[in-house]
């Protein structure tokens, strides 16, 4: 799933007629890492975002937008439940809703962590 950062990088990269491998080489990362960053599986450092902005010729507002999108992407977590049963899917969804709505207390979160760490 593309994050806002991934969408921006991909758009700017395609607009610049640059292939993923070319950009990866230009910024000093592997194509696999850059692809993972575009797809939200890896979080690029601020230094890498600077290099990407430089390679793409972004400055000012566009570079700042890329940095903000990168920061927002670092605060997101994704899990793939496609191969899980319905109970696991509902459990994950309920947990996510509890966190997003701030209905999960610190005490409840600590109990869940204890359960998860005991496996």
Image (cartoon, rainbow, N blue to C red):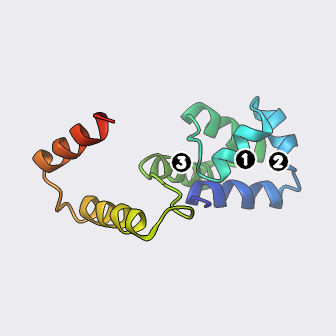
Residue 3 in the image: above or below residue 60: below
First in sequence, mark 3 or 1: give its number. 1
Residue 15 appears in view = yes
Q: Which residue is mark 1?
A: 35
Callout 1: SS:
helix
Q: Position of residue 27 (x, y in %)?
A: 75, 33
- Report crowding for label 3: few under 14, some 14 to 19, many 20 or more residues within 10 A (C-alpha): many
Is 51 left, or right, of 73 in this rendering? right
Nearer to us in this view, 41 or 14? 41
Do tag 3 and tag 1 residues touch (Cβ < 8 Å)? no
Q: Could you tell me which residue is drawn at 62 percent across and 40 percent down?
A: 49
Callout 2: SS:
helix
Q: Position of residue 68 (x, y in %)?
A: 49, 51
Nearer to us in this view, 42 or 52? 42
First in sequence, mark 2 or 1: give its number. 2
Q: Which residue is mark 3?
A: 70
Is 3 left, or right, of 17 in this rendering? left
Q: Which residue is mark 2?
A: 20
Q: Nearer the viewer, mark 2 or mark 1?
A: 1
Q: Position of residue 16 (x, y in %)?
A: 84, 55
Q: Could you tell me which residue is drawn at 33 percent across and 63 percent down?
A: 91
Residue 54 appears in view = no
The alpha-carbon separation of the residues under discs 2 and 1 comes to 7 Å
């Amino acid at each position: 799933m593309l994050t806002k950062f991934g969408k921006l990088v991909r758009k700017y990269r395609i607009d610049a007629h640059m292939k993923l491998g070319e950009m990866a080489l230009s910024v000093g990362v592997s194509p696999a890492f850059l692809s993972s960053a575009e797809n939200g599986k890896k979080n690029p450092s601020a230094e890498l975002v600077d290099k990407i902005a430089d390679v793409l010729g972004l400055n000012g507002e566009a570079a700042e937008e890329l940095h903000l999108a990168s920061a927002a992407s670092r605060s997101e977590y994704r899990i793939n439940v496609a191969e899980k049963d319905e109970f696991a899917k509902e459990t994950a969804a309920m947990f996510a809703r509890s966190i997003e709505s701030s209905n999960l207390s610190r005490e409840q979160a600590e109990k869940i962590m204890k359960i998860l760490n005991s496996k």
